[in-house]
Amino acid sequence: MVSKRACRRRDDRRSVAASWAGDPIGWMRQGNHNGEGDLMRSIFTQPVRAFEGGATGPSAEDVLCINTIRTLSMDGVQKANSGHPGTPMAMAAPAYALWQNVLSYDPADPLWPNRDRFVLSIGHASMLIYSLIYLAGIRDVKHGTVLDAPSLTLKDLEQFRQLDSRTPGHPEYHHTAGVETTTGPLGQGCGNSVGMAMAEKWLATRFNKPGFPLFDYHVYTFCGDGDMMEGVASEAASVAGHLRLGNLTWIYDSNRISIEGSTDIAFTENVQKRFEGYGWHVLEVKDANDQAAFLAALADAKAETGRPTLIIVHSVIGWGAPHKAGTASAHGEPLGDAEIRGAKKAYGWPEDKSFYVPDGVLEHFQKGLGARGAAASAQWKALYASYARDYPDLAKEVDAILSNRLPEGWDKDIPVYEPSAKGVASRQSSGEVLNAIAPNFPWLIGGSADLSPSTKTNLTFQGAGSFQPPEWNGTYGGRNLHFGVREHAMGSICNGISLAGIRAYCSGFLIFSDYMKPPIRLSALMNQPVVYIFTHDSIGVGEDGPTHQPIEQLVQLRATPGVTLIRPADANEVAEAWRTLIPMTDRPSVLILSRQNLPTVDRTVYAPASGLAKGAYVLGDCDGTPDVILMATGSEVGLVVSAYETLKAEGVKARVVSMPSWDLFEAQPKEYRDSVLPPTVTNRVAVEMASPVGWDRYVGLSGSIIAMHGFGALGPGRRNCSRNSASPSKPSWPKRASRWPRVDSWPGRPPRGAPRPVSVTERGGDRLLAGDNPP
């Protein structure tokens, strides 16, 4: 039930909207301190530092530019008959003030390395950034080259949300020059911006020298009530406060409206105190239209170098709309022709013109943002030329980072592992390989969600250090990142770091990849080469029980387009996995590793691990055409190798295939795929301690899948695997393998003691499993 206070608050909003609807320009210049500011501030128990506007308001040119942003945004949403007009209308004035007066950004060179970053975490308000990109004259970029053509034209704005448009519903990185990161899922942009700020700190610590401040950019993020509600933004804010990221400013549009209505129905917390608790510098601007107050707050934020800053800006969503301002109707739907005409009339705008850009607006942007950015980027390029003469080796690293090149010799120390029946856990061998690569790859940095002792991702070589502020006995040049128990923010932050050109990795238990689906998906959408390392990959986790035993996670990750997943079978496959994934600079990769030891295959007997690069390869074979093909990934490869040896001893012609990466295998020519899995051989068995979904494409209609259809069980890892017919030490195959060489010839019940594969044809593929014996 909505309280009477909430009802009065909505009535107050309507009366305020009515009071300025007839003269919004005058209202904007004078500032509205006659109820709305007090109304919005009433959610706080104590005042934060508030800024009052001066006597001098915005110029006529400023007002013209601000209203151009508003009307372009309204018209774009209306023409598409889809979108969110209210926030661009509300935040046009702060956005204009930031871009025109503060942002260090060269529209003629949107790839300038030391540019300030602007992140629109409220990605649904995309017409705001598209209008700014067009009006600022940002140039287009193709394949890393700046073109002598605009990123967006007025025609592009008219094609908002249309098929193949350059102005999609939510901003997309690499799709529209001027967009620094893909946003839309609320909170992700906030997390990305923390990563961007961390990247600037790391770059500055490594490369800046006396007289050469190569990297000193600031990160500005527009966020909203939805971002404040999303857990990932809270996680990221906590990280930023701990790290004391004084180069980060979030501008919070507190319009107190969501799709369902007033945020009073679900969001009444004190945001100010929450962020003060995180260690942030918190400021308040009472009226989004007060240019002087907002610019003063930005100056205060830039001067605060020891803490991130949150500027709470109170706005009225749909500002200027005569009937929908301050209501949920202005949030997520077109205003309608009549309401748009009313808003344009209030702005003093031609009511019958759409996508109208008055004379002088484009030129005014060039006199402000354009001229300031051009001068700053030219000065930086001259500085960098001198830097390259004085510090050629460091300049070579900077060039490699900016051009997405790998350092020479990055893989020269990758170890080769000797055969071992006992073997080593793949998480352990991965940690060893990572520590062999990292000293030769200086901008490879990463960490874990408080699990590095378990995921073995801590960089232990001399000088690696921890990324921490000096107050926490660290350095911003440290290469070990500590995310705390914040998996969701960890992924989002790594995306932000990666967007700066630094190679980022993060790690956790595979089961907790569930917390990281959004950032992994966005890594793929943005083609960011973040390395996601997930350990404890199966029911072999054992004692932690089914809550920690991943079953369906491999399916989810494999199903994500643009993600390369590798589940290596032994230490040498781990080494080859790293050798394969590091050169992948256009996609994220997921490395799946075991907790338990895996035998190190004797490569003098079996095929070399370099076959991993093709996704699947013949590990062991027979003379001629095999009668049966056994295939597996990761820890289960050892099981099928044991079965292969048993079959071979009994004279059965068998082949064993290691399939660490389905997507790499699918990328191979058909001739290669058919050579590994000959279509004429239909007796196939696939083994994986996870969901069977997807394996049917490889075993075919008459093959069988030994996998999991339950959540595992509590118990020591080996006993748990044995119960589920997947013991790494003693596979539960029948004593006489000759009894079951043809899986399609088994009667209704398999031989006693055999794992219980279920033919695809028997169950229609919907419950393919077996070997899983519930208690």
Image: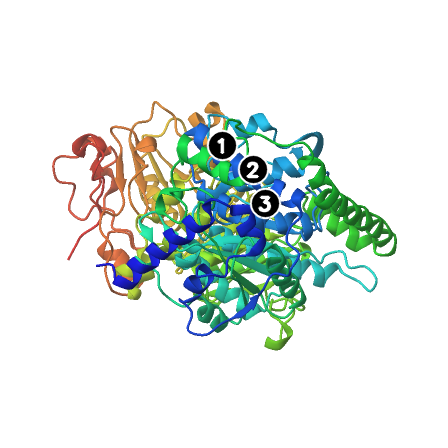
- Per the rendering, the mark at residue 76 is 1
- State which mark lies toward you, 1 or 3: 1
Q: Quadrant of residue 249?
A: bottom right
Q: Mark 1 or mark 3: name the one nearer the start of the chain.
A: 1
Q: Quadrant of residue 157?
A: top right
Q: Nearer the viewer, residue 478 or 610?
A: 478
- Write the residue at 46% across / 47% down: 520
Graded by Cα atoms within 10 Å as few (under 14), some (14 to 19) or many (20 or more), the crowding at tag 2 reads many
Q: Check disc 2 and report the residue beneath it.
A: 130
Q: Check disc 3 and report the residue beneath it.
A: 180
Where is residue 223 shown, x and y percent of the image?
A: 49, 53
Graded by Cα atoms within 10 Å as few (under 14), some (14 to 19) or many (20 or more), the crowding at tag 3 reads many
- Write the residue at 54% across / 63% down: 310
Q: Nearer the viewer, residue 233 or 132?
A: 132
Q: Quadrant of residue 460?
A: bottom right
Residue type at mark 2 is Tyr
Give me the C-alpha separation between circle 2 and circle 3: 12 Å
Secondary structure at badge 2 equals helix
